[in-house]
């Protein structure tokens, strides 16, 4: 823990938020005085109940096995490489992600962070290293304390809300200039590797691009970024939401993943120096096409996720691939051979980044191992091709539970816990009577 101690002392940190991402990517954890964190980490006494990984998005517990009821403690090990200054706090504060372990030192199998590391280990055994870059979309909305009321765009600097799409509009993005500047300042303080921000197609919808890097580090940064954006938005009197489909007449919000794979020498394995695609690139795409439709809950984890994936709503409905074709679920951007990559456009902004990236990487990994051939690239509108993604969370879970090959690689403990959470959330949703039902059925049927 000497590196942790040095980091804290050099920055004068007084408190530390120890972050544990749960199954939905919701940050849970503990806030400790820095001295107490260091002592607990040194003594191996930094612990948390294991039920943190059985919490549903509604805040209930899904556990139905003996271990869930006994709720044993996990030992937490702070990941020093994830340490960053926490911006916006009066008391000097830091964030640190922690990995959960059993008392014997083995990793806690249902931890999403461990699941991603488990997938990365498979790549490491082959001498490969994935490189990823998320693109994350989100909406700013007016404050909405009543969940029965639809969300609306917030007032901008002009005192007016957006009423029409403004894709890439510079005047539109400056409507929220103060808020955006605060986001960038906080992100810089936290050391996030951000690239560019643009105005997306929806009203008050923004997109941030992250620079390419390590899968675990980028997943950590996505969650820290979400935390920063929500807090900055509240200070400016608006909401920020990463729901996949927050407004019915607006496009959904995605988390596109740019993925490449390099070898031990750091060279891109998806293309040759003369610019030709390698067999590995085609097999990787073949794996994405074969397995992603079967493990959709890992990147579309909520009922609302499937409202985003509709034809004509800027979200893919299949796993066609194309060269620089944004109607496809899988897009190969124009790039030289060193930057040859595939953009997975399927995950929503609501997805847990560790699991969405793990799903893409495990699918591509199996494609390479099994030498699965990709279909031909699609030119033109990919929406005219048949839908291959499930339409509902219920259907998606059924297909996920039949995909034993991926489940065996992700681990039985994780799959069991993940399914229990999603089934509990689905049951809770199905018990809700919607405004549509009251509107159209109450006095007519």
Image (cartoon, helix red, strand yellow):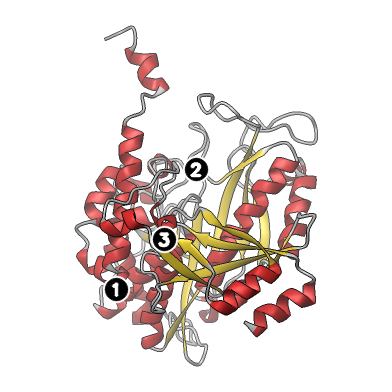
Among numbered discs 2 and 1, the one appearing first in the sequence: 2
Badge 3: residue crowd in 10 Å (few <14, some 14–19, many ≥20):
many
Whether 305 is drawn above or below 8: the answer is: above
Give the residue number, with chain letter if any, for mark 3. Answer: 50
- Residue, x 69% and y 79% (percent of image)? 5
Give the residue number, with chain letter if any, for mark 1. Answer: 367
Among numbered discs 3 and 1, the one appearing first in the sequence: 3
Location of residue 308 in the rendering, given as x and y in whole percent from the top left corner: 43, 42
Q: Which mark is residue 252?
A: 2
Find residue 29 and report its image quarter.
bottom right
Residue extending furthest bottom? Answer: 265
Q: Is residue 296 left or right of residue 272?
A: left
Location of residue 178 in the rendering, given as x and y in whole percent from the top left corner: 80, 46
Find residue 59 and report its image quarter.
top left
Of tags 2 and 3, the one toward the viewer is 3
Q: Is residue 248 left or right of residue 102?
A: right
Q: Is residue 331 visible?
A: no
Whether 40 is drawn above or below 385: the answer is: below
Location of residue 269 in the rendering, given as x and y in whole percent from the top left corner: 44, 83
Q: Is residue 234 left or right of residue 298?
A: right
């Amino acid at each position: 823990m000497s590196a942790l101690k040095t980091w804290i002392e050099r920055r004068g940190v007084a408190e530390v938020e120890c972050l544990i991402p749960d199954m939905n990517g919701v940050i849970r954890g503990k806030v400790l005085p820095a001295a107490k964190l260091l002592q607990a980490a040194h003594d191996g006494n930094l612990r948390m109940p294991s039920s943190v990984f059985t919490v549903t998005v509604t805040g209930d517990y899904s556990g139905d096995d003996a271990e869930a009821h006994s709720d044993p403690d996990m030992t937490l090990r702070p990941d020093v490489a994830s340490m960053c200054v926490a911006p916006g706090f009066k008391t000097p504060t830091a964030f640190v992600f922690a990995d959960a372990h059993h008392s014997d030192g083995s990793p806690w199998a249902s931890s999403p962070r461990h699941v991603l590391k488990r997938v990365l280990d498979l790549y490491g055994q082959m001498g490969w290293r994935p490189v990823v870059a998320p693109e994350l979309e989100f909406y700013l909305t007016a404050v909405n304390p009543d969940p029965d009321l639809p969300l609306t765009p917030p007032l901008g600097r002009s005192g007016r809300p957006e009423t029409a799409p403004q894709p890439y509009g510079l005047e539109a993005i400056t409507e929220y200039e103060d808020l955006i500047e605060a986001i960038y300042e906080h992100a810089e303080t936290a050391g996030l590797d951000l690239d560019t921000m643009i105005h997306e197609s929806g009203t008050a919808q923004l997109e941030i691009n992250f620079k390419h890097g390590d899968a675990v580090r980028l997943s950590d940064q996505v969650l820290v970024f979400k935390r920063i954006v929500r807090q900055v938005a509240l200070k400016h009197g608006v909401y920020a939401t990463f729901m996949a489909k927050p407004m019915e007449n607006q496009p959904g919000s995605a988390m596109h993943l740019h993925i490449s794979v390099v070898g031990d020498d750091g060279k891109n394995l998806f293309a040759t120096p003369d610019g030709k695609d390698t067999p590995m690139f085609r097999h990787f795409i073949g794996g994405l096409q074969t397995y992603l439709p079967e493990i959709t809950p890992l990147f579309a984890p909520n009922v609302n996720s499937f409202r985003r994936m509709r034809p004509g709503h800027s979200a893919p409905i299949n796993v066609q691939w194309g060269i620089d074709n944004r109607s496809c679920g899988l897009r190969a951007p124009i790039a030289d051979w060193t930057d040859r990559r595939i953009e997975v456009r399927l995950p929503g902004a609501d997805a847990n980044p560790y699991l969405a990236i793990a799903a893409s990487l495990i699918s591509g990994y199996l494609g390479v191992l099994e030498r699965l051939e990709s279909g031909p690239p699609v030119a033109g509108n990919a929406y005219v091709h048949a839908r291959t993604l499930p339409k509902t969370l219920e259907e998606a879970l059924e297909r996920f539970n039949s995909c034993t090959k991926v489940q065996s690689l992700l681990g039985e403990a994780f799959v069991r816990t993940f399914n229990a959470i999603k089934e509990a959330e689905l049951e809770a949703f199905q018990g809700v009577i919607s405004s549509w039902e009251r509107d159209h059925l109450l006095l007519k049927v």
